[in-house]
Amino acid sequence: VQLQASGGGLVQPGGSLRVSCAASEFTLNRPAIGWFRQAPGKEREAVSCLSTWNDITYYPDFVKGRFTISSDKAKNTVYLQMNNLTPEDTAVYYCATDLARSSSYALCHGRPTDWGQGTQVTVSS
């Protein structure tokens, strides 16, 4: 399983950023893939998950309407578009998957087994 997150950086409050997760073709054939984040001193939390076989997405309430997950299977890449960012969105963002989690909801509510390295997103003026 190969997952590589990239695209993080510094963005001002209210700004937008898109992070990418390059996956091996095998990984992208997993039933679900998602984005998680961990801020300093906080537990890791799910921010967006995608069922790859029917494109059903799941978002927790605190990002709903601001974050969008998508995939480009031709490029074996999953994206997270983040809009209207706030300082509370500052964290290391990870992409993850789990062969045993067959839906976006299950992945976002579980503890995925396979993780990529994270990418830092900092929201600050």
Image (spheres, helix red, strand yellow):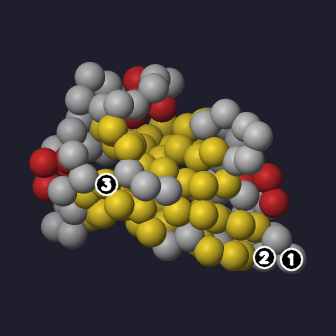
Query: Which residue is under mark 1?
Result: 125
- In the rendered structure, the answer to whether residue 60 lies left or right of residue 98 reads right
Residue 13's label in the rendered image is: none
Left or right for 20, reference 11: left
Real-space Cα separation, disc 3 to disc 2, in angstroms: 27 Å
Disc 1 marks a residue whose amino acid type is Ser
The spot of residue 122 in percent (x, y) is 71, 67
Residue depicted at x 42% and y 62%: 5
| Vertical relation: 33 (above or below) 107 | below
Label of residue 3 in the image: 3
Q: Earlier in the sequence, mark 1 or mark 2?
A: 2
| Residue topped by disc 2 | 12
Left or right of 44 in this view: 33: left
Dot 2 falls on a residue whose secondary structure is loop
Quarter the C terminus occupies: bottom right
Q: How far apart are the alpha carbons under marks 1 and 3?
A: 30 Å
Q: What kind of residue is marked 2?
A: Gln
Left or right of 30 in this view: 13: right
**Three-letter code for the amino acid on which mark 3 is drawn:** Leu
| Crowd tier of the residue under label 1, counting other residues whose Cα lies within 10 Å: few below 14, some 14–19, many 20 or above | few
Whether label 1 touches label 2, CB < 8 Å: yes
Residues under numbered marks 3 and 2 in contact, where contact means CB atoms less than 8 Å apart: no
Name the residue furthest left.
26
Secondary structure at badge 1 equals loop
Is residue 78 visible in the rendered image? The answer is yes
Q: Earlier in the sequence, mark 3 or mark 2?
A: 3
Whole-percent x, y for residue 48 in the image:
51, 44
Q: Is residue 88 above or below residue 76?
A: above
Is residue 14 at least partly visible in the picture?
Answer: no
Residue shown at 74% from the left, 47% from the top: 40
